[in-house]
Amino acid sequence: MQRGRSGVGQYVLALTRALLPLAHRHEFTLFVLEEDRPLLAFAEPAMRIVEVPEPFRSPLADIGWHQTLLPAWARRLGLDVLHVPSYRRMLWRQPCALVATIHDLAPFHLQNKYSAARMFYGRVVARRLAARQHRVIAVSETTARDLTRYFNLPRQRVTVIPNGLDHDRFQPGPAEAAKAVVATRNGVDRPFFLYVARLEHPAKNHLRLIEAFNRFKAETCSPWQLVLGGSDWHGAEVIHAAVAQSPYARDICCPGFVSDADLPIWYRAADVFVYPSLFEGFGMPPLEAMACGCPVISSGAGALAEVVGDAAVVIDPLKPAALVRELGRLAADPAARAELRRVGSARARRFSWRTNAEATVQVYAEACSPSRGTLFFPARAPAHLPPP
């Protein structure tokens, strides 16, 4: 879960909360690393929590625990179905019915997304593990198509369940109060564009956004600022160097990791949310921004166009000129921003964790069904598999 800071971690926390109302009809067991237990304390006593020793936190130790100890624990506890929320942790052994959530197949779309070892694992090992699952949940139609194309999974074994949205956290609020908070804490005291994503290069496309912002400033002499919220990740040093070299570096703010409590404040304070990512299997931040009343410019890569629909300005993330144009247009047109707030709010209301949880429990039932069928083992990689 990376202490709740990763996308998978947020998925686990949100799904667990949404499953709580169903705990009177089903028994749920959560396997939780010792130091992460406080993050899931809200689930007790409705759900049973089994602590995993902290030495299993590192990626290799974690994978080893999933493949060796977890199957034995599942059998000992008499579990009917085991749900693994990440493709890198899927089980080979089958102590019970297996369900996995696959959020994206980024290794097939972004060649420099991970290290060589992780790319091999995502392209080769995960493909074999996916074939061992009785049911697979895809968070978007885009990911479902990728599972059929790259993992050669039968479509009938894949269920699309879009991520939900926590509408208690992400909702409109007083923009001026939010602006006062970020001005006091971070010195962002003028209209600003916001991008929230870990500082990861090249996958999150920060360099093209910085380039577009530089051109926007040069062409318009606008007072607008740019905020890049997120913790450092692979390639962060490249992003920081680009900020430092920008002639408008004083107008670019990097506040670091944005906490759960602060995230809605940033969305409400921002005048435009920009999400130029090169690939997403879903893409939560644009929806969160919409729910908080912030107009959105989004990449259309991966599942993003599917998720934002016609409620955002959709751009090609590889073309900075298009982004420059839209930055300038929205900065100068309050009416356009107001219309995006209206349609974005309506779009965000379509995504519910309650609906997600109910559909997920249905997948559990299908995985446990005697009619689930035999498992599928792809004999070879598909011919269109891209080179590593």
Image: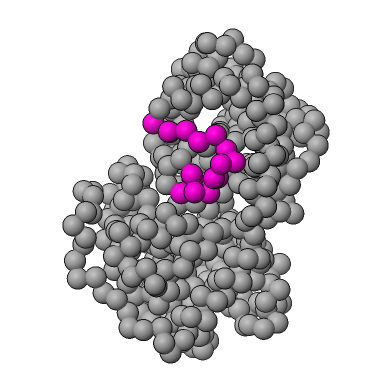
Q: Is residue 371 visible?
A: yes
Q: Nearer the viewer, residue 56 or 254?
A: 254
Q: Is residue 205 magenta?
A: no
On the picture, is 231 further left or further right than 98? right
Q: Nearer the viewer, residue 327 or 96?
A: 327
- Look at 63% across and 48% down and name the residue there: 347
Above or below for 188 versus 364: above
Q: Nearer the viewer, residue 386 or 33?
A: 386
Q: Is residue 309 magenta?
A: yes
Above or below for 308 versus 236: below
- Look at 63% across and 66% down and name the residue there: 355
Q: x, y percentage for residue 278?
A: 41, 39
Q: Nearer the viewer, residue 315 or 273?
A: 315
Magenta-colored span: 303-318
Q: x, y percentage for residue 97?
A: 44, 82
Q: x, y percentage for residue 324?
A: 50, 21
Above or below for 365 versus 142: below
Q: x, y percentage for residue 368?
A: 47, 84
- Look at 54% across and 25% down and name the residue there: 326
- Look at 49% across and 49% down and name the residue there: 306
Q: How is the image coloured?
A: one colour
On the picture, is 215 further left or further right than 119? right
Q: Is residue 37 visible?
A: no
On the picture, is 324 further left or further right than 250? left
